[in-house]
Image (cartoon, helix red, strand yellow):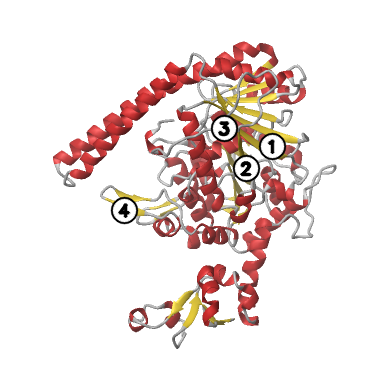
Amino acid sequence: MRIHKVDSVFVAEADFEERTALKEAGFWWHGGGQWCENGKCKACQAGLSGEKLWWTFKKEVALRLFDYCDDDARDALQNLAVKLDASRSSALYDAEFPVPKGLSYYPFQNAGIAYALANREEGLGTLIADEPGVGKTIQALGVVNAATDVKSVLCIVPAHLRLNWLKEAQKWLTRKFKFHVVEKTEAVPKTANFVIVNYDRLRNGKRANPVYDSLVSRAWDVCIIDECHRLKNPKSLQTKSILGYWDKQNYDGLIHRANIVLALTGTPSPSRPIDIQAIAGALDPKLFGNRFYFGKRYCNAWRDRFGWHMDGCSNSEELQDRLRGSIMIRRLKRDVLKELPAKIRQIIPLPLNGSSTAVKSELKAYEAHKAELVRLRKTVFGEKEGTEAAKEAARALQSYQRTVFTEIAAKRKKVALAKAPKVIEHVDDLLDDGGKVVLFAHHKDVIAKFSAHYGDSAVVVTGDTPLKSRDAAVTRFQTDDSCKVFIGSLRACGEGFTLTAASRVVFAELDWTPAAMRQGEDRVHRIGQDADSVSIQVLVFDGSLDAQMAKTLVEKQEQADAILDNEQARIEVPLIVGAPPTKKSSTSPAVVVVDEFDAQVIPF
């Protein structure tokens, strides 16, 4: 086999038996025919003549057969090869960057800084998508240190991380800045050149927004967007204000006022590939800006009478190569922080013991509503589009869906409350073995039960906890030996917190998004963790909806991993079902057997 370059096309001359390798790599067969005759064939347009050849115009496809390329083809692929290596690198670059005295970057963090600086030269933004706990904040601040011409920085972060960003910036920056943390709905002082603002302050709608207006009227050297997966919906005011949007003409967002754009997240695709399109399109509009093409190519998009659906996954290997070859750097903890312990995930079924009524009621309601929803959907599809009957059927479906959400959400809460005493018993057993525990839940009443039981030996953080109190709770848990349990709402505590004083995480309730669960795990499994292993335990009632959800969460996480980590995803520490019980536990965990179900029916 020999691959050479003809204009913009890579052409392979191969024997018959080599065709399988070419097909698997993604090359196309150039056999003449209608497309060539009509002048639509890109190979013909590039000047390729003759039939019975294999070809591609995609560099990432040709790169898979790099060893068979001639010198000209290799030269054309060299930059992409280097960038793909850099996107996984722990120490590709020898350069060292400015850092305050007494501190230092890990080698992979130096590589991340270098990757972002190289993207700046190419006119691209950078998606720092390292796993949670690897130190993305430090890398972003390292870019500010390394780019000596930077005089102004805008940080867009979740509200509860504003003080954390302020502390980290004051610790890691090598030059002096005038910091300003936005707390009120008023214009940001022009004298502030390091501004930290939360997402909620940046909705640029019909109402006047002094914060947004004062920020968008300035030029920024660097714009940092932390937890950027929050911008997955391109139609939201928040996303439009930050990333801009297109509607007959282009409307600039805050990122278009910056010279360097750094987007940070450990979960760039929370549950499906389309979630990454908005941020990827903003960082590299030419490659990822067309949402419709992105959906068709990478989301297995399909259309019905209600429009296009882009919740699938396709060509995940190609998407990963394109992301890594342009904007994304992503390293896994096991590759760059080899001293970190392994995660051990467990699903632990709890005995019903008096809770069977609540579980049965939950399942019965779910099954009843599932059948009715199917019937109503068929009714909608059965009516002629645009007719009054079709509109009435759609209204009936929407009304019933609201009823489903209200009823099943209430029943799920009853199940969670019934489970709470058994969760407490399980956590007590863990504490008897020594050490600390991070306990996540969803409902406030459930969290209140945990708080009442553990009293002063625990700290509690929910969405209602003030920002300064959250910081104090984390500090106490990390430093006070008498504080044994961190009780948190997953949505309030899943991002930015460091809880490495514990090596055990218990989920009393599940979140529907696998990324949210992963974020919760990584509050403990991150830089600073020195335990031999980190235990992740999901407690479910045997046969409940949570048990069914557990399987679906694993499947969704595998899909998300496929577009980010590819081969690495196949060697993750496997989910362990049926782990040994703790020494006092009366529970005897067994294999959880669950059936397939319609994920869209379950309200969470």
Indicate which label's residue lies in the foreground, 3 or 4: 4
Indicate the amino acid at tag 2: Pro
Indicate the amino acid at tag 1: His
**Which residue is identified by label 3?**
159
Q: Earlier in the sequence, mark 4 or mark 2?
A: 4
Indicate which label's residue lies in the foreground, 4 or 2: 2
Whole-angstrom CA distance, mark 2 to mark 3, is 34 Å
Indicate the amino acid at tag 3: Ala
Q: Is residue 390 above or below residue 453?
A: below
Question: Residue 224, how many percent across, how many down?
Answer: 60, 46
**Which residue is identified by label 4?**
303
Question: Residue 146, how many percent across, how many down?
Answer: 73, 53
Indicate the amino acid at tag 4: Arg
Foreground: 355 or 501?
Answer: 355
Is residue 147 visible in this depiction of the protein? no
Crowding at dot 3, Cα within 10 Å, few <14 / some 14-19 / many 20+, comes out as: some
SS assignment at label 3: helix
Using the image, tell me which numbered label, if any, was put on residue 558.
none
Using the image, tell me which numbered label, if any, was put on residue 574.
2
CB atoms of marks 1 and 4 within 8 Å: no
Indicate which label's residue lies in the foreground, 1 or 2: 2
Crowding at dot 1, Cα within 10 Å, few <14 / some 14-19 / many 20+, comes out as: many
SS assignment at label 4: strand
Quarter of the rendering containing residue 579: top right
Whole-angstrom CA distance, mark 4 to mark 2, is 36 Å
CB atoms of marks 2 and 3 within 8 Å: no
Whole-angstrom CA distance, mark 3 to mark 4, is 38 Å
SS assignment at label 1: loop
